Each structure stands twice: as C-alpha cells, then as structure tokens.
Amino acid sequence: MGAVDIRGVRKSYGDHKVMHGVSIAIPDGEFVALVGPSGCGKSTLLRMIAGLEEITEGDILIGDRVINDVAPKDRDIAMVFQNYALYPHMSVRKNMAFALKLRRLPPAEIEKRVRSVAEILSLEPLLDRKPRALSGGQRQRVAMGRAIVRDPQVFLFDEPLSNLDAKLRVQMRSELKELHQRLGTTTVYVTHDQIEAMTLANRVVVMNAGRVEQVGAPLELYDRPDNLFVAAFIGSPPMNFLQGAVTEDRSGLTLPDGLVLAVPGGVYASAGTPVTIGIRPEHFTIASAGWPVAVSVIEPTGSETQISTRLAGRTLRVLIRGRTAVEPGETIHITAEPDNIHVFDTQTGLRIDRR
Amino acid sequence: MSATLTLAGRRRKRPIGRYVRIAGGITACIMFLFPIFWMVLTSFKMPRDIFTTPPTFFFTPTIETYTSYLQHADIPNRMLNTVIVACGAGLISIAAGSMAGYALARIKVKGLATMGALILLSRGVPPIALAVPMFLVARNLGLTDKHITLILAYCTFLIPYVMWLMRGFFKALPEELEESAMLDGCSRFGAFFRIIVPISLPGLLSTLIFSVILAWEELLFALVLTNRYASTIPVAIAGIAGDSVNGANWGALTAVGTLTVLPVVVFALLVQKWLIKGLADGATKG
Ligand SMILES: Nc1ncnc2c1ncn2[C@@H]1O[C@H](COP(=O)(O)OP(=O)(O)O)[C@@H](O)[C@H]1O
Ligand SMILES: [Mg+2]
C-alpha cells in the first residue's frame, strides 16, 4: 500500500539541472535513508515525493498510483521539516489535531488519537502549550507527533535531527528507530549524516550531484562500496586511499613517485591499470611485517585509538581497538586482510571485483 | 559573555547617550504634537482669543464653536461618509493587498517580481495627475459623488501599499508552515487563511489601521470625485479654510480638525497595547 516507486525522475530549475534520472523502489514498510553531501538533491527529491516541488520528468508512484499531478493534500503523506514548522498560533494539541480536523474526524476520535500519540512520545504535559514555550527537543517531538497522529501511508523526514544537540540527536535516533519498528510505516529519511543513515535505515540511498551512487543495506555499503564516492562517503573516520598503477606481477601497486607497495592478496586488475585501493582505518593491523609507516599523531578515545601515520608523504589513518604503546616518531608496520582491501578503477571510479 | 560586554558598554555611555536620547524624544514629540495641541486649544477659544498677540494659553474655554458651527455645515453627515469610505477602502485594500502580497512573497513565476515593482512604481505618479482622469472615468460610469467611487479611488493607492508591506511580512515567515499545512490537508488558499493569516494578524491589523488613516485624511480625490452627497471631512475643512465669501473661520476649522483627529487617536489608543504585543512576539518561527 505505502510503497513508493521513483522512476527515472529528473528535475531542473529553468536550465539548471539538479537531478539526472533517479530511480528508487521503496517497498511498503521500509525505512529508507537518502544520504549525500549538501546540495546533492536529497531535499528536492523528498519534496517531489511530497508534491511541494514539480517533477520535471519521470514518475513517482505511491502504492500503484502515479502521484505526479496529485495535490500534496491528497497524497496521504506526513512530513517532518528541519525547522519543524509547527503552527505557532496553535497549542501542541491543536497542532496535532489540525490534519484530523481537516479530515472531519469526530472530535472524540481526534482526542483519542492525539492522546495516544502524545503518550507514545511523552507529550502529555505539553499538550496545552504553544510551540514558543517548548525547547528544541520538545518541538521536534511535537513535529513527529503531528506526523504520526495522521497515520499516513508514508513519512518523510528532512534532516529532522540536525537542529538538536549531539546527545539529544543520538537519543532521538534510537527513538525514531523504535517508532518505525512499532508503526511499520514506509519512511523516507533525508540526512547528510552517514552515521544517522546507517544506524536508522533498512536501506540507504547514497546520492551525489543529482544521481544515485548506490542503494543497499547499510552494511552492504560499508562492505562493498560500488565506487569511490560511496567508499569515501560511508564510514568514519573515512577510508584511506592510495593511487597507483598495478605492477607487472599484479602483486602490488607502483605509486606515482615510483615506490612499489606490495598489496596483500594482490591487485586483481590487469598490469599497468591505474587503480585506487581503499582500506578502512579499522581494517589496518599493526604487524611485524607490512608497510613501514611513521607515526605522526596518536589520538586515544579510551575504547579505541586513532593513529595518523605517514607513508612516503601520504597520510594513512589507522584505528585500533584499545590502547597502544606506540609513540609518535616511531616507525611501525601495518597490514590488512585481502578481503578488506577495496580496489577501484581510478578513471571510472568503479569497484573492481576479485574474480 | 556578550551580555556582560553590552552592559558594561551601556553603563559607560549612559550619562551622555541617555540624555541625548531623552532630549531627542522630547524634541520630536513637541515638533509633532504642538500643532495638534494648538489646534485643539484654538477650537475652545472665542473668536476674539484666537488672534491675540502674543498668543495666549489662558482664556475662558467655550464649546460655542462646536455647537454653533457643526450642524450647519453638515459635519455629522460628512463624518459618517468619512467613516464609510475610510473603513471600506481599508478593508478592501487589506483583503486584496494581503493576498497580492502573499503571491509576491511566495509564488515563483517569471515576471511576478517585475509586476510587483511596476505596481509600486505607479505610485510615483503625482496623485493630481490621476485625479482628472479618474474624475472622467467616474463620470462616464455614472459614479460621481458616491461612496464606492472614493473607496475604489483610495484602493488604487492603498492596495500597492498594503501589498508591499505584507509581502515583507509574509516573506519573513518560513515557507514550511504552508507546506506543512498543505500536506496536512489544506489547499494553498486554506493554508493562507488557516495558518498565514492568523499568524500575521498583528501585521495585518497595523497595516489596516495605517490604511484607514491614510484614507481618512485624504483630500485631493475626495475634492475631485465628490460633491455633496459623499463628501468627506477633509473636504469640509478645505472648504472652511478656502471660504472666499466669509473668510476662513479659524474656530470652525480647528473644531472640525479636532473632531477628525479624535476618532483616530481613540482608535489607536484602543489597539495600541495589542499592536505592540503583537509586534513584540511577532517572532513566529516555530
Ligand atoms: N528553488 C530552487 N531554484 C534553483 N535551484 C534550486 C532550488 N532549490 C534547490 N536548488 C538546487 O538544487 C540542488 C539540490 O538542492 P537540495 O535538494 O536542497 O539539496 P540537499 O537537500 O541535498 O542539500 C542544489 O544545487 C540547489 O542549489
Ligand atoms: Mg536539504
């Protein structure tokens, strides 16, 4: 019922093309996160689903109905905005009841639904306050309550947590996830924060400059990024990259400055191909043999330690569990499992798979 | 931190800055209020007290001017006309102007901004240049000396005024408010009336008041477009001042003037508290 199907959607503002053919199929009940750098078109896509922005080309379906020309009010969609957009002249109760009143539900039914949602979100003591008298976190809850109370086919969220402080953001993140598990409503969630996307969603859509770079389960994106963009975008601290050409025996990489690095497991591309290999900081281990790197900075957080190292003028970040006796200035050897080494074609940016 | 800085800065500045500000305020008040004060004072004088040299502040007050002059010059009727015309023009302009201002603030159509600017620019034409064409149009339509004629004439300058004031007001409201309302089940119109209008009430009301006042004191169009039946108080005042047969009756002039100002002042005092409150919490962001 609440499935959302986006088919070849394009968007231009006059001559300015901002979306170049986006297709995403979202099954009913799924939690999908749209993630990407600022300006990549996430909000625009969300607003096209909502009907707040015209679709230049392509179709968007909810259920099996094409909604391109359906007015926002008839789409049965609820949206939570980054600035919450609470109606300032209405109490929390009236904010939540607004859509139900417009649908001419009986007052008793409205009151019942508002109460039950207020209970879920612990909003009961705030019901008679105006938005002005609420804290940021409370406003955020009211905005969610206003969406939930409608029991729509689809929820849309546009960076709903980005105005909260870090601690509240983490708390609301878990609550949102729990809420989705409880309600099971199809949800499209826009964020520029990849951690938020990874932790919340069943499926993550990585967007860049008006295109979809990859769609997949959070761990799929982490384990097998399709291209350099996704590899660099997903994961924190970000993946380390080394560019070079595949050596004759395909056992390693010749860096631009002539240095030859042996790559554990070899590089599975034809000799001479310019490739970029990517290794996540947490996949490096300190070993007795491997790439010799000079330790420059050590940043312990208690549970793990981030070590910045230099390899022939390049910085490689290494993240290890626990603590380390390594000191800045020391030279250590680092290595990684062949399975954790990603190879990309430097020219196309595409992943090269082991055959 | 910044609060402390400001406090310290203010404390240092207080001796000079404060007195300058107070003196400035008093000067401005005197400049604006003295003519009105003098008008009210004069209206209670006997004719012989009006032109004494030096002017006198102390005299035996009388309401003789009010009682003797007012019925005979048809003042109550003209007062009623003024109320009808000013309120009618104010209400029509606020309705049309606020909707136009909303469109200018929100709807993205090529050329709309230019159109808005043109409407505003049309106000650069001196009213006197429009008065005669307007008179001819009104006469051809058989609309001379009617309330509706004046109301429409006033709308031509009040609507652009309201439109531009309200456009600024609406622009300051986050667009997500209406978008939210539209997703909640409103049409664009519904979102405007259920969300935007209630939030903007203080702005709408103050604009309405200024519009009514502008129409209230308008002379030129009233002079040209009305005659006897629909003529307004400013016309009466002009008539007294320019009476070439009996000479200007200064007592009557000030009495009618006082009566003209009175409703405006009472009205402003009534709504002032509400207006200031509205403006103060006009920070409507969610
Ligand atoms: N009304 C508009 N007119 C012109 N360009 C716009 C408009 N709205 C958004 N854009 C452009 O569309 C692109 C995508 O914007 P947006 O969807 O807001 O990005 P995101 O939400 O991913 O940060 C940006 O390059 C932005 O400049
Ligand atoms: Mg955005």
Image (tube, coloured by chain):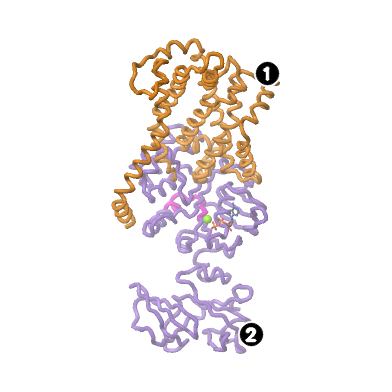
Q: Is residue A186 magenta?
A: yes
Q: Chain of mark 2?
A: A
Residue, far right: B140
Residue B200 percent coordinates (x, y): 47, 37
Type of amino acid at the residue the image marks with label 2: Gly
On screen, B145 above or below B29? above
Residue A86 percent coordinates (x, y): 45, 44
Q: Among the chains, which one is orange?
A: B
The quarter of the image that holds ligand 1 is bottom right
**Rendered-image quadrant of the N terminus of chain B:** bottom left
Which residue is label 1 attached to? B142
Magenta-tinted stretch: A178-189
Give me the disc on residue B169.
Answer: none
- Total number of numbered labels? 2
Q: Would you say residue A342 is visible in this rendering?
A: yes
Q: Is mark 2 within 8 Å of ligand 1?
A: no
Pick whichever, B144 or A137, lies toward us.
Answer: B144
Left or right: A298 as drawn, with respect to B164: left
Type of amino acid at the residue the image marks with label 1: Gly
Name the residue at 59% across, 73% down: A351
Pick whichever, B179 or B203, lies toward us.
Answer: B203
Q: What is the drawing colour of chain A?
A: purple
Left or right: B211 as drawn, with respect to B116: left
Q: Is residue A196 magenta?
A: no
Name the residue at 50% across, 46% down: B174
Label 1: how many residues lie within 10 Å, few (<14), some (14-19) or many (20+)?
few
Left or right: B146 as drawn, with respect to A35: right
**Rendered-image quadrant of the C terminus of chain B:** top left
Name the residue at 56% across, 41% down: A73
For numbered disc 2, what is the local secondary structure?
loop
Q: Would you say residue A253 is visible in this rendering?
A: no
Residue B141 percent coordinates (x, y): 69, 21
